[in-house]
Image (spheres, grey):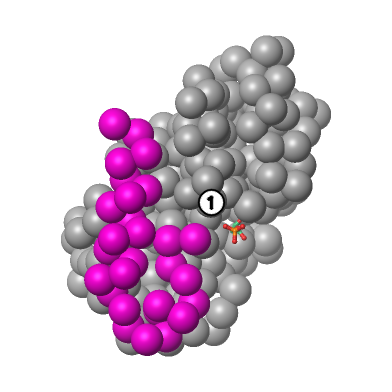
Amino acid sequence: MRTEELFDLAPVVPVVVLDDPDAAVPLARALVAGGLPVIEVTLRTAAALAAIERIAAEVPDAVVGAGTIVRPEDAVRAAEAGARFLVSPGCTDRLREAMAATGLAVLPGVSSASEAMALLEHGITAMKFFPAEAAGGAAYLKALGGPLPQVRFCPTGGVTTDNASRYLALPNVGCVGGTWLTPADAVRAGDWDRIEELAAKAAALRP
Ligand code: 3PG
């Protein structure tokens, strides 16, 4: 799968932080039912790899990926668990090489023109823009589109239902990502209906 194909699947990528691997499958099903099949599970918890494994095995309509890839070995482990794409908050040469070696779709993180240009030198044209709101928001991303129109971004970090449309209106935004679709209290309570509802609202952001 190419990263650009992810952009076509959904306007919003839920960024999921899971403590309980048993929550992974019902959570993924709720997101898919709401219309958001692309799901990023962050490698910030001990449960993350098991969660990716279960979603990959049991929710065939989901396209599950791994986020918070910060070390080369994270890329290898995520690929082994069944992740179909890899997301990192920033990028180094070693990390870029390790992510490319998996053959998976990748969204390396950048927050400046120079960082984006460094990835362009390696043929990478799809990137995470992180931390989106703190780094300058939609206005900043629009400005980057002037000199670098060939790059498409997934802004993440501070993106919510209130500002997502501003990003999605930009030609250089492929999708947006965020944790607002899976509030910790809803996940803890197993309130999958609420998560499906949040997903459905987000899915409607791009008609
Ligand atoms: C991340 O931490 O990778 C995402 O940027 C999530 O950010 P958010 O919690 O602001 O949506």
Q: Position of residue 62 (x, y in %)?
A: 27, 57
User: Is the residue marked 1 within 8 Å of ligand 1, measured from its CB?
Assistant: yes
In this view, 128 is above or below 121: below
The answer to if 192 sits in the magenta stretch is yes
Query: Residue placed at 69% from the left, 27% from the top?
Result: 139
If the image is split into quadrants, where does the C terminus sit? top left
> What main secondary structure does the magenta stretch of the protein show?
helix
Residue denoted by label 1: 160
Q: Position of residue 27 (x, y in %)?
A: 31, 72
Residue 155 relative to residue 115: left or right: left
Q: Position of residue 155 (x, y in %)?
A: 58, 41
Residue 77 relative to residue 120: left or right: left
Residue 94 relative to residue 36: left or right: right
In this view, 30 is above or below 185: above
- Mark 1, other Cα within 10 Å: few <14 / some 14–19 / many ≥20: some
Q: Quadrant holding ligand 1?
A: bottom right
Between residues 143 and 61, which one lies in front from this camera angle?
143
If the image is split into quadrants, where does the N terminus sit? top left
In this view, 52 is above or below 140: below
The answer to if 141 sits in the magenta stretch is no
Query: Residue placed at 68% from the left, 63% from the top?
Result: 71
User: From where the camera sits, is residue 108 visible?
Assistant: no
Query: Residue placed at 53% from the left, 66% from the top?
Result: 42
Give the extent of the magenta segment. 180-207
What amino acid type is highlighted by mark number 1? Thr
